[in-house]
Image: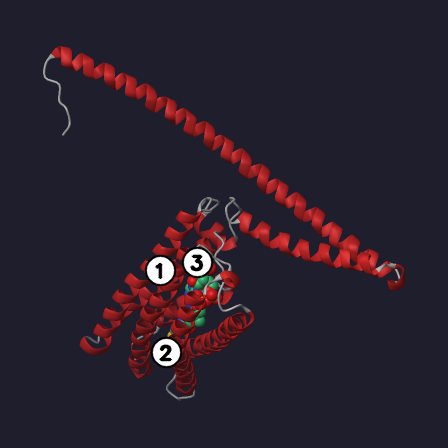
Amino acid sequence: MLFSPTGLTECLREWENLEKDYQQIQDTHRLYKQKLEEVTKLQDSSSGAISRQRKKLKELSLSLEACKENTPTPTLSPEELEAITEIRASIKEREDAFSEMEAFLPKKNGLYLSLVLGSVNVTLLNKQSKFAYKDEYEKFKLILTVILFVFSFTCRFVFSYRALDALFYFLLVWYYCTLTIRESVLISNGSRIRGWWVFHHYVSTFLSGVMLTWPEGVLYQMFRNQFISYCLYQSFVQFLQYYYQSGSLYRLRALGERHNMDLTVEGFQSWMWRGLTFLLPFLFFGHFWQFYNGITLFKMSQLPQCKEWQVMMCGCSYMVLFLGNFFTTLGVVYQKYMNNQDKPKSL
Ligand code: COA
């Protein structure tokens, strides 16, 4: 409970104490500002040193290349050739090390973030904050997935009003837009999200925007139920994805081996495989549904009563989504399979 002084003497004593506390607060804050300045200087010198090293390494690589090309091979001894190969391998490793370091240094935002947020620094400076941000991103997706699931269920089975559909499409546009911003921030913080998944969310934003502008009519009603059923299914798959992605995140964090797949233990690898093989049939079913949506829309565009440009636009968007999602997922699975084959099964 807070102490409340009653008499004047007590008030004066309390004031003296508060004065002392205030002095301490001022000292702590001064120290904090001083450390902040030191950190800023260290950040600048670290970024500068990295870019200088990068430049020099680039020049060295070119010089080594020239040495190799200009000298007829027999004049270079096997030791010299080996030294060149070793230096080249080390240069490549150093590039990876610099990328890891840069994940903890402020950097200029890319075009998209500069347009949306301006030149504010989005780099989080420690692993805990990065993890917390990623965790929040996954939770945000989960909450929105539940809302979208309930919304699409209501539109599909309870009410059928164009105005309510429009609200649903608007929510989709906002959701995907927000995802693209959050993913750009994650990438700035060293996340390895493939460019396709971010692009996939741009296409989804566009697609939802086109659905929003599609006027009520025969063609809209022809496609409406199929689209909303697909959204319902996608929310369900997103729910499964959440368990896989957040499970991976927590396990990798627990192992303390983020971004270093070659050191993961058997338990994590087998968990990941089980998760992925469980998820894959649902993902591929979703991808073929996207293909089916594309075909349906292309067929609708051939109908004599089809006047709306939205039919063709949505059809093309679905085809792009299908091709990108299908082949990227295949690529991810192949890469993980190969990694799994190459790596020792246990530490
Ligand atoms: N959206 C956002 N981020 C994704 C992602 C996606 N679809 N897929 C992977 N990532 C992120 C991971 O969280 C990880 O981030 P981190 O570096 O910050 O830890 C990074 O990208 C690298 O992930 P990776 O190891 O390549 O893949 P994964 O094992 O995490 O996930 C899949 C693999 C195939 C399960 C996942 O990519 C996926 O669900 N893809 C299908 C998406 C889709 O088709 N949606 C439509 C469904 S109908």
Which residue, as the protein is rendered here, is positioned at the far top?
9
Q: Earlier in the sequence, mark 2 or mark 1?
A: 1
Label 3 sits on residue: 183
Amino acid marked by disc 3: Glu
Depth order, front residue of 209/307: 209
Q: Earlier in the sequence, mark 1 or mark 3?
A: 1
Label 1 sits on residue: 138
Quadrant of the picture in which ligand 1 is shown = bottom left
Does ligand 1 reach within 8 Å of label 3's beta carbon? yes
Label 2 sits on residue: 282
Which secondary structure, mark 1? helix
Query: Disc 1 or disc 3, which is closer to the eye?
Result: 1
Amino acid marked by disc 1: Glu
Q: Would you place residue 310 above or below residue 171 in this image?
A: below
Task: Say whether residue 270 is visible.
Answer: yes
The numbered dot on residue 187 is none
Q: Number of labelled discs?
A: 3
Does ligand 1 reach within 8 Å of label 1's beta carbon? yes
Depth order, front residue of 334/37: 334
Figure quadrant of residue 171: bottom left
Q: Would you place residue 118 above or below residue 298 in this image?
A: above
Figure quadrant of residue 322: bottom left
- Residue 72 is left or right of residue 327, and the answer is right
Image quarter (top left, top right, bottom left or bottom right) of the N terminus: top left
Q: Residue at x 42, y 71 (%)?
A: 270
